[in-house]
Image (cartoon, rainbow, N blue to C red):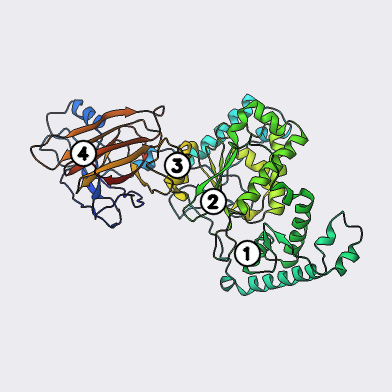
Amino acid sequence: MTDETPTQNPPTAAAAPPTVTETGSPAVLEKEDPSPVLQVAAVSVSVTESLSTTKAEKDEQTPQPHEPIALEPDSTDKGSGKEELRPTPPPQSVESESEPPAVTEAQKEEATPAETVLISESESQKPEVVTESESLAAAMEKDEKPTAASTSTAQQEVAAVVEEKKAPQNLGSFKEESNKEADLSDFERKALEELKQLVKEAMDSNHFNSESKSEENPEKEKKKGPKEVSIWGIPLLKDDRSNVILLKFLRARDFKAKDAFVMIKNTIQWRKEFGIDELLDEDIGDDMDKVVFMHGKDKEGHLVCYNVYGEFQNKDLYQKAFSDEEKRMKFLRWRIQLLEKSIRKLDFSPGGVSTIFQVSDLKNSPGPGKKELRLATKQALQVLQDNYPEFVAKQVFINVPWWYLAFYTMISPFMTQRTKSKFVIALPAKSAETLFKYIPPEQVPIQYGGLSVDYCDCNPEFSDADPATEMTVKPGTKQTVEITIFEKCVLVWEIRVVGWVVSYGAEFVPDAKDSYAVIIQKLTKMTSKDEPVVSQSFKVSELGKVLLTVDNPTSKKKKLLYRFQVKPFCN
């Protein structure tokens, strides 16, 4: 059996180098858990993969022929247990055949490079174009509900594309450019110097300040001398943080200094008219706190912002946000306020993190058929693109429904090619796995498959700072996390299988031959309705092993997360 090495973050507990052993059984392979060596060797960890108990029982119940049958290399049958049968060779790529496709793709414009990043594994293939149903698009443009025929057609088209996506696609991850001046090309450095000169001339002549509509005598303002101009709390041309600000505008305008200067001038003017300085201290209310919120950081240190469109299924909330122009403007001001406060937490030094990781959850979203939501989205996109350039490190869409392809076609004209190149799209079945590619599981909110919860007394043992181990439980297999104890202690752990539909059990097996094993939790079938995270502890009074077992009898692979701590033993 081919083992898949788990993605390992160092556990909170002190761990010694794990022991790797391999048995002669075709169904069992004990493999190394790549835990780094920590300071005190209190425990060690290893992971064992074996055949699912449920599958093994089915195989035992299957009538066997009188004579041995040669097994095919790609068979998943592990045999009947007769000695004359040889071990089954490893199965071939179970995941690629049994799993649904990893992603869908966003629509791209004709004769342009790929605009949307796909969730997949291969690096050899390029994304393909997904064609939108014209009947569905036309219905939405007319603010009409799509007919049953158009909906069926669109769904069939998407289903056909999904069927074709069994082959791995290119991940094509967008990589942020360096903001250090030494890393810029000669062309980029020249454009930066040209823009700095244009900004300096405008500041010396008070050009930025004289743009205000309230100024009755601009010439009088120019005689007062240059005034300091700041954007997002960073004074322009005062230190190297200003270069990072200017580079954002340059990249948004393909390093055309004059175009970038016009964009800066318009942004400064818009910030005055919108009242950004006053907005920071304005009390707009907290009705939308569950719609958009900041939570944790990704693996590169970016702040993560979650946009939960499903909250607008609440009709009262929807009406409160979008029913008329005044309410849509209030919602926009609330969204801009949250963004401005988040930007103040960024590091604008040349080597710092000055962008935000965006996650948009489309589960139960009202969809583009809602005229008010579509207007508000269009308005917000225009404001953000014109006045907040290059603040998105990555835009991940999760729980994406079939209609998103049509919706993407409608909003894509309002986004730059550079913005669209940062998009990542994941279907519901792949949402948690997609987030884990970019965000540590302990930083992902519990409702999205992670271990992070709001700080409270419900789980004081762990926090977002305690790393978790992530691994895959293959279809029809059983994973056992073996924690070997080298001293008396109290072992505390959390374990989660995203979506569950597996069996979980825990036991302590002492080293002493005359001691008995202790069942901490009997192997129990867990469903999606159970608590998403199991938190347990065990007082270890003698040396031995704690075994955490996850039995996956389904035909789908599962994501397993766990972390543990070792605490002092108290009599």
User: Does the image show residue 289?
Assistant: yes
User: SS class of the residue under badge 3?
Assistant: loop
Task: Say what amino acid the circle numbered 4 marks.
Answer: Leu
User: SS class of the residue under badge 1?
Assistant: helix
Do the residues bearing badges 4 and 1 touch, measured as CB atoms within 8 Å? no
Do the residues bearing badges 2 and 1 touch, measured as CB atoms within 8 Å? no
- Could you tell which of marks 3 and 1 lies nearer the N-terminus? 1
Mark linked to residue 244: 1
Residue identifier under label 4: 71
Residue 295 placed where, x, y %? Answer: 52, 45
Residue under the image location 54 percent in, 65 percent down: 351
Mark linked to residue 303: 2
- Could you tell which of marks 4 and 1 lies nearer the N-terminus? 4
- CA neighbours of label 3 inside 10 A, class few (<14), some (14 to 19), many (20+): many
Task: Say what amino acid the circle numbered 2 marks.
Answer: Leu
Do the residues bearing badges 3 and 4 touch, measured as CB atoms within 8 Å? no
Task: Say what amino acid the circle numbered 1 marks.
Answer: Val
Residue identifier under label 3: 452
Disc 3 from disc 2: Cα separation: 15 Å
Quadrant of image for the C terminus:
top left
Q: Nearer the viewer, residue 424 or 277?
A: 277
User: SS class of the residue under badge 2?
Assistant: strand
Mark linked to residue 133: none
- CA neighbours of label 4 inside 10 A, class few (<14), some (14 to 19), many (20+): some
- Could you tell which of marks 2 and 4 lies nearer the N-terminus? 4
- As drawn, is 412 to the left or to the right of 514? right
